[in-house]
Amino acid sequence: MRLLKKIDLIATISIAVVGIVITLLDTFDSLPSFLSQINLDFSKITVIMLSLIAVHLVLSLLSNEKMEDDLHESITRVIDSVGGVDTKMFNTIQELEVYLAKRIQEAKKDVCDLTWKNKVSFGFSTNARKAANKKIDDSIKKVGPKITYREVFVFCGDQFRIDKLAMRIAQNAPGYSCKYYKNSNAIPRIQFVIVDSEELFFVSSAYPYYCAFRHKALVEIFLNYFNQIWDSPDAITIKDRTTIYQDVYTDIMNGNID
């Protein structure tokens, strides 16, 4: 890198010197006699100047590319040193849900899923949302035998969630477990999904942004929060892997939730 800078500096100085000499000679009308004395015509000087300029441009390009690489590497190191956030933003909730379905299907060990916000968002019955959620359901069905999938419900009298539970129970995937909370208060609840303890999804069309992100410390905070929810004595178990608590499930199907 230093050698390139030295060569570039020499080329730049040469261009400047030749340019200044030609300008001075031309100013005093001495250029023709000077060229005749050194037995060099103006076209050759032009070629030399253009060659020096080309060398300068090439070396500058190489230097800039190296500088860009160094800058990128430095930025990466800074981001890594502060535990940088890898964020994915989506234009619509459907795009987020399709990506979530893909990540669930790629999961290697576990998924933590909160299905418990107070009110199902307007527009949930649209064809686009139905198609996106079908992808999620299909992914859960595929990974259920291979990974641990834990889901927490609050039903809020919503038939869609009750139907979803019925589908999960009918599938009876050995890795799938779920619990529920009685809808005893109206405190807003944040809804999210964590895949493989490394990627966090905020899954609701009610949120101002549709996003998923990876950040070790922040994901661990939300994972700890989920585990507190899961382990609470107020969480009523519906299904624990292959064991279905039939009396609890029957109460939910009969509407005896609160």
Image (cartoon, helix red, strand yellow):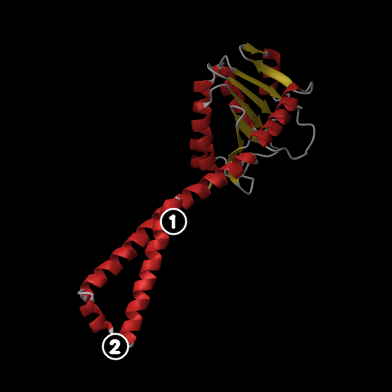
- Percent x, y for residue 174? 57, 14
Identify the residue position indicated by label 2 in the image. 29
What residue is shown at x 37% (from left), y 63% (from top)? 11
What label does residue 163 carry, if any? none
Q: Residues within 10 Å of mark 2 (few under 14, many from 20)?
A: few
> Which x, y percent locates residue 178?
65, 21
Residue 89 in view (yes/no): no
Residue sitting nearer the eye, 142 or 154: 142
Helix, strand or loop under label 2: loop
Q: Of residues 213 and 54, which is closer to you in this image? A: 54
**Horizontal relation, residue 128 to residue 150: left or right:** left
Could you tell whether 79 is left or right of 156 in the image? left
Rendered residue at 61%/11% (across/down)? 242
Quarter of the view holding residue 161: top right
SS of the residue under disc 1: helix
Q: Nearer the viewer, mark 1 or mark 2?
A: 2
Q: Amino acid at mark 2?
A: Asp
Decide: is 3 above or below 118: below
- The answer to which of marks 1 and 2 sits earlier in the sequence is 1
Q: Position of residue 130 (x, y in %)?
A: 51, 37
Which percent across, then down, holds residue 149?
60, 22
Above or below residue 74? Residue 114 is above
Q: What residue is at 64 percent from the left and 25 percent from the top? A: 151
In the image, 4 versus 125, the foreground residue is 4
Residue 192 shows up from this direction = yes
- In the image, what residue type sits under mark 1? Lys
Query: Which of the pair 161/15 is nearer the observer?
Result: 15
Q: Is residue 50 above or below residue 249?
A: below
Question: Which residue is located at x 41 percent, y 53 percent?
Answer: 4
Q: Which residue is mark 1?
A: 5
Label 1: few (<14), some (14–19) or many (≥20) C-alpha neighbours in 10 Å: some
Distance in Å between CA atoms under marks 1 and 2 = 36 Å
